[in-house]
Image (cartoon, rainbow, N blue to C red):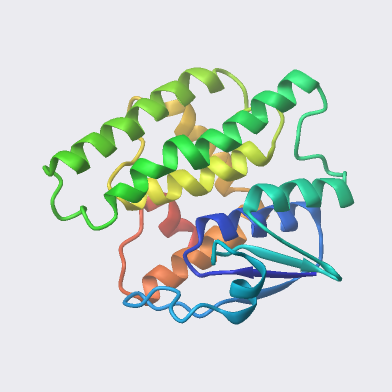
Amino acid sequence: MKLYSGPLSMFGAKAEIAAHEKGIAFELVMVPFEMATLYQPKHPEVLRINPKRQVPVLVDGDLEIFDSTQIFEYLETIRPEPALWPADPKARARARLLEHTSDEVYFPPIVRLMGLQSTPDDPAAVEARAAATAFYDTMERAIGTQGWLAGSYSYADIAFYMAQLFGARMTAPMDERHPRLQAWRDRMSARPAVAKVAGAMGRYLLSQGRKLPPFLAKLST
């Protein structure tokens, strides 16, 4: 099995963490990346396999797939244990929705913050931070007294952990209003698979002279 990812790919990191959590052996291909040019020129295998021209891409024999959620589903099928979706149908549906909203509801405002960190009063930045805070508020209520977002540890936790990592980097961190989420993040950071992947990303950022949020700095030493 071969996984194409990138040094700062949130979605690639999701797939990496999932494979490590499953104990699946894979070859990690970290495609070339530069802060100035990003992923240009694109890796030829990524271009060939994914019409969206993005990582992650997974190759397993004659199977070639892309998209982190599709990779989650494949890994869950070929390696059912340890399960990373809840067994109960309703709990599983909620977990899948959380994974989806992390990517498609929470993350787009974070993307809009890229390039606006030095202009925090820009209306677009203010709006994006407000959207992130509203999402944190919702998740703070949703987690309640649970250890994990969907009851049992799941892909929903992996997805939101990586998304909020980028939120913290882009000036939209959790704050004192979100103690349960911050405790959840500490539990996530303590997982070996998460620490391995997030720590590698943090070390790459340090090598580029970038500042890290405190929780990520701890994983990157």
Instruction: Tell me how many marks there are.
Output: 0
Drawn side of residue 77 relative to residue 68, left or right: right
The quarter holding residue 84 reads top right
Q: Quadrant of residue 65?
A: bottom right
The answer to whether 61 appears left or right of 44 in the picture is right
Depicted 173 relative to depicted 151: above or below: below
What residue occupies the far front of the structure in this picture? 51
Residue 42 appears in the picture as rendered: yes
Rendered-image quadrant of the N terminus: bottom right
For the residue pair 161 and 213, the one nearer the viewer reads as 161
* Viewer-side residue, 79 vs 182: 79
Q: Nearer the viewer, residue 184 or 56?
A: 56
Answer above or below: position of 26 versus 110: below
Whether residue 175 can be seen here: no
Residue at position x 35%, y 45% in the image: 110
The residue at the point 65 percent across, 77 percent down is 45
Residue at point 51% right, 42% down?
A: 103
**Residue 91 image position (x, y, % from top left):** 72, 22
Is residue 220 left or right of 96 when viewed as pictured? left
Q: Residue at x 60, y 37 (%)?
A: 99
Question: Picture coordinates of residue 149 (x, y %)?
Answer: 60, 29
The answer to which of 105 and 209 lies nearer the viewer is 105
Residue 48 position in % (x across, y down): 64, 74
Looking at the picture, does residue 68 appear above or below residue 28? above
Residue 35 picture location, percent across and down = 35, 74
